[in-house]
Image: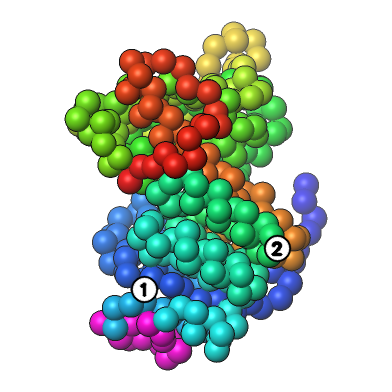
Amino acid sequence: MDKREAFRVIEESQPKHTYRGAVIGCGRMGSTIDDEHIGMPHYPWPWAHAPAMIEARGVKLVAGSDVDTARLEDFKRRWGVTALYTDFREMVEKEQPDIVSVTTRPGPRAEITIALAEMGVKAVFATKPMCNSLAQADAMINACRKSGTILAIACHLNWYNWYTNARQVIADGVIGRLLSMICHSPSSLSNLHSHTLALFRLFAGAPAKWVFGHMDNDERAASDNDLSGSGYIVYENGVRAFMNSHSERSGLGWTLEFIGEKGRIISRNAHAQFELWSTHPETRGPIQCQFPNPWHPRSSMVDAIEGICRSIEAGEEKICPGEFGREALEIAIAMRESHRSGGVKIELPLENRNSRIG
């Protein structure tokens, strides 16, 4: 039995220092998305970056930037932040933030991230999808690597305490070796499923090797717009993943399954319900077990913000680095390219770095 004191366990998990935080893009993901989730237990407060910085240990929200002055006024009203700027470069020069959340539209995200790295920001937390093209993703990663900036992608489910416990269950051998992963969801591949694909990459523990895909709509697949469809991913260590993302709602909501040699973990109803199934030691039939619910549950975004603080202290990002965001983008593009070519197998990485989606 764990004999540690509860308050010590909590204390030891917090960052060692306090970092100055700022948000670029004071709209939906940066500030207001929680307005949409009042009364919805699937989405534990907060999901927006600004209130997550306020709630997280180890961060002080000091500034915000947006080209829309009305958004800045609303940001000030909500969060009491008075250091507000329409020019993010001026904000960085004057406020010297350590962690900057980039919650703009994908279009300018690469340019902003590269500029932040060149200005010496310690960590950039860029929301998903990472950007629009593989060339942009490469440039973001290279700029941050050159400057020593931590680049983390805000696929915050990777930090969510429920999925952390699910990974521990697999590490403990409860379901045996991980064999495959399945996603059922009616959402688009590049936008929402950046979360799914980054989570798959974390659980697989290896890069994706090849994919094929079948899109829902030929006309949309012929364009560079985001789209939905189904696909199959094989990772370098042999783990397989199935993506079932129809544009027409399937009634399953957002469901994820992680299947091992002797059991499985199921996440249902947009991460609201978790099940653990193992094998009965005598009958060898399936048996449902108690899922190890988090002892100290928090919002996934709060978990992520604190995780980035610890990544600064460790000198590297392991839970959702830029490479995971790039792979999510690349898989979405590769599935579409597979469809365009008649359902052929597409090897990764893609040679055409100008490929884009979104």
Residue neighbourhood size for the residue with mark 2, other residues' Cα within 10 Å, grouped as few (<14), some (14–19), many (≥20): some
At label 1, the amino acid type is: Cys
Q: Which residue is mark 2?
A: 148
Compute the Cα span from label 1 to label 2: 26 Å
Observer-nearest residue: 38 or 137?
Answer: 137
Q: Which residues are magenta?
A: 70-86
Residue 85 in magenta? yes
Q: Is residue 247 above or below residue 156?
A: above
x then y, percent, for residue 291: 55, 37
Residue at 40% in and 49% down = 132
Q: How many marks can you see?
A: 2
x then y, percent, for residue 271: 42, 44
Q: Is residue 1 above or below residue 274?
A: below
Residue 236 in magenta? no
Residue at 48% in and 51% down = 136
Q: Is residue 103 visible?
A: yes
Tell me the number on the disc at residue 26: 1
In the rendered structure, the answer to whether residue 271 lies left or right of residue 19 reads: left
Observer-nearest residue: 3 or 322?
Answer: 322
> Closer to the observer: label 1 or label 2?
2
x then y, percent, for residue 48: 40, 65
Observer-nearest residue: 202 or 286?
Answer: 202
Pick out the residue farthest to the top. 283
